[in-house]
Image (cartoon, rainbow, N blue to C red):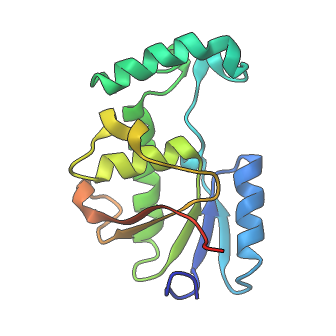
């Protein structure tokens, strides 16, 4: 038992290599647990900045970051081929809602990327919102605990309750 929860019914992840490998390793500890990848859990799309060195695009990233913090959460990173916080949150919320509704009453473990976690958490916390998603702490391999009580087709962010953010295993 992890965090006092029963074993997960599903370990789900993005199809990207690192998330998939981490989820496979975790799923190995639960032999009866299903394993699946979901395109909707992919990291934020960076458009024209995709694959660039951070040092080369630092100025553009800082500029779009300021726009998001200022409330312009429809601004896309990397131009039209990139995603905005609103795009990302819509994709992730829809995917997570569908995953959870299909497994009502069970524990589901999602292995996700930093921006995916930040967008999900910020969009479902009433006192946050997407303009503050950069404030959501997310260390590598951290655990977030979110309860879901809703339907796949629902739209209410109140169907999600954040119980823990950026938790780490203690020594």
* Residue 48 picture quarter: top right
Relative horizontal placement of residue 140, taking residue 62 as reference (left or right): right
Residue 73 drawn at (x, y percent): 33, 27
Relative horizontal placement of residue 154, taking residue 109 as reference (left or right): left
The image shows a total of numbered marks equal to 0
Q: Is residue 21 above or below residue 117?
A: below
Relative depth, front residue between 58 and 19: 58
Residue 29 drawn at (x, y percent): 74, 81
Relative horizontal placement of residue 12, taking residue 95 as reference (left or right): right
Residue pictured at 71% horizontal, 19% vertical: 52
Say whether residue 74 is visible: no
Residue 79 drawn at (x, y percent): 51, 13
Residue 32 drawn at (x, y percent): 69, 87
Q: Is residue 27 above or below residue 128?
A: below
Residue pictured at 27% horizontal, 45% vertical: 128
* Residue 45 picture quarter: top right
Residue pictured at 70% horizontal, 53% vertical: 19
Say whether residue 115 is visible: yes
Extreme residue toward the front, this view: 171
Q: Is residue 157 above or below residue 3?
A: above
Residue pictured at 36% horizontal, 18% vertical: 67
Q: Is residue 160 above or below residue 169?
A: above
Relative horizontal placement of residue 13, taking residue 143 as reference (left or right): right
């Amino acid at each position: 038992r992890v965090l006092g929860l029963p074993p997960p019914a599903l370990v789900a992840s993005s199809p990207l290599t690192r998330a998939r490998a981490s989820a496979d390793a975790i799923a190995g500890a639960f032999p009866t647990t299903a394993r699946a990848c979901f395109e909707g859990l992919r990291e934020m799309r960076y458009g024209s900045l995709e694959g660039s060195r951070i040092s080369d695009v630092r100025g553009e990233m800082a500029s779009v970051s300021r726009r998001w913090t200022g409330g312009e959460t429809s601004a896309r990173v990397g131009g039209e081929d990139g995603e905005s916080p609103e795009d990302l949150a819509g994709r992730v919320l829809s995917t997570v809602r569908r995953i959870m509704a299909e497994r009502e009453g069970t524990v589901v473990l999602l292995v996700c990327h930093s921006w995916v976690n930040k967008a999900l958490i910020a969009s479902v916390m009433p006192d946050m919102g997407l303009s503050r998603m950069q404030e959501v702490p997310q260390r590598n391999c951290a655990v977030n605990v979110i309860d879901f009580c809703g339907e796949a087709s629902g739209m209410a962010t109140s169907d999600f309750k954040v119980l823990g953010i950026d938790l780490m295993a203690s020594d």
